[in-house]
């Protein structure tokens, strides 16, 4: 997942703009990718990068309550972020994904591989993006270098739970922020203060995916929301 590589290395490389700085970038990128390949025992990899134009993402048209990634307008990217992205695309063959996120492309690739081979055992998803925890298979954490396996039930339950929690990173409201968007601040603050959302999530640990979905739908219905809000 090249976008995460760009962010990670952009934060750690010194703020140099001379030729030596770019050599350092390449050296660090080579070192990081070599470490990943060694950990996974393969050099057969695909790198994906999300296009920088958020407006072109299909979610921008679907986000009617809050603008998709609207909370990132003033965010500061790592110093060498654009330069690393350029190097990854031009020199490492990273795939620039348009119209969707890089993690969408990775998820599609993973499921197409499973459909063809009937197994998740021959692929790894290397990232620190929590959204990809909604995709079954072997996951490699770029920070901890730990590999764990997410089965199909767990992946689906992770997806359903995010319907409840939302995604603050991408400005996608869950139940709390949906209440706020509807002007129901007191109810939203009550939920947040008592940490009910995390308690709701914990309550579904031993549920099947369908039970998790029905439970979450029940939570929305208890506040007067229905299927439309989950859609």
Image: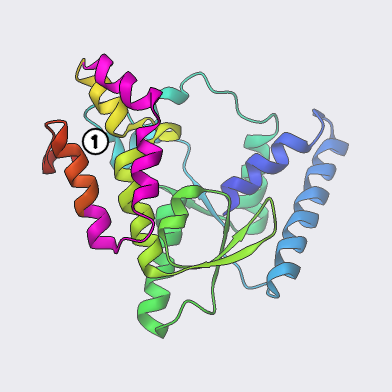
Vertical comparison of 3 with 168: above or below: below
* Residue 22 on image: x %, y %: 80, 40
Image quarter for residue 76? top right
**Residue displayed at 31% across by 34% down:** 174
Query: Would residue 153 be seen by someone viewing this image from the given angle?
Result: yes
- The quadrant of the image that shows the C terminus is top left
Q: Is residue 157 magenta?
A: no
* Residue 50 on image: x %, y %: 48, 45
- Judged by its main secondary structure, the magenta piece is helix
* Residue 106 on image: x %, y %: 46, 60
**Residue displayed at 38% across by 69% down:** 152
Q: Secondary structure at mark 1?
A: helix
**Residue displayed at 84% across by 44% down:** 23
Left or right: 111 in relation to 214:
right
**Residue displayed at 64% across by 40% down:** 7
Q: Which residue is at the front of the view, 127 or 197? A: 197
**Residue interval drawn in magenta:** 184-213
- Give the labeled residue for mark 1: 61
Vertical comparison of 67 with 99: above or below: above
* Residue 33 on image: x %, y %: 72, 59
């Amino acid at each position: 997942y090249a976008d995460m590589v760009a962010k990670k290395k952009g934060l750690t490389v010194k703020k140099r703009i001379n030729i030596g700085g770019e050599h350092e970038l390449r050296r660090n990128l080579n070192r990081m990718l070599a470490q990943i390949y060694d950990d996974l025992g393969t050099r057969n990899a695909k790198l994906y990068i999300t296009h920088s134009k958020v407006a072109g993402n299909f979610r921008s048209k679907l986000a009617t309550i809050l603008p998709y990634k609207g909370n990132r307008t003033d965010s500061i990217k790592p110093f060498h972020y654009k330069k690393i992205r350029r190097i990854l695309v031009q020199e490492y063959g990273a795939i620039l994904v348009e119209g969707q996120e890089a993690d969408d492309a990775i998820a599609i690739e993973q499921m197409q591989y499973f459909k063809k081979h009937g197994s998740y055992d021959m692929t790894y998803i290397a990232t620190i993006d929590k959204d990809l925890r909604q995709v079954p298979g072997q996951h490699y954490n770029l920070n901890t270098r730990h590999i764990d396996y997410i089965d199909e039930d767990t992946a689906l339950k992770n997806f359903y739970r995010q319907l409840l929690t939302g995604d603050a990173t991408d400005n996608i409201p869950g139940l709390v922020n949906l209440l706020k968007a509807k002007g129901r601040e007191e109810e939203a603050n009550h939920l947040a203060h008592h940490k009910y959302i995390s308690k709701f999530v914990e309550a579904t640990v031993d549920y099947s995916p369908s039970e998790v979905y029905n439970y979450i739908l029940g939570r929305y219905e208890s506040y007067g929301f229905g299927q439309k809000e989950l859609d």
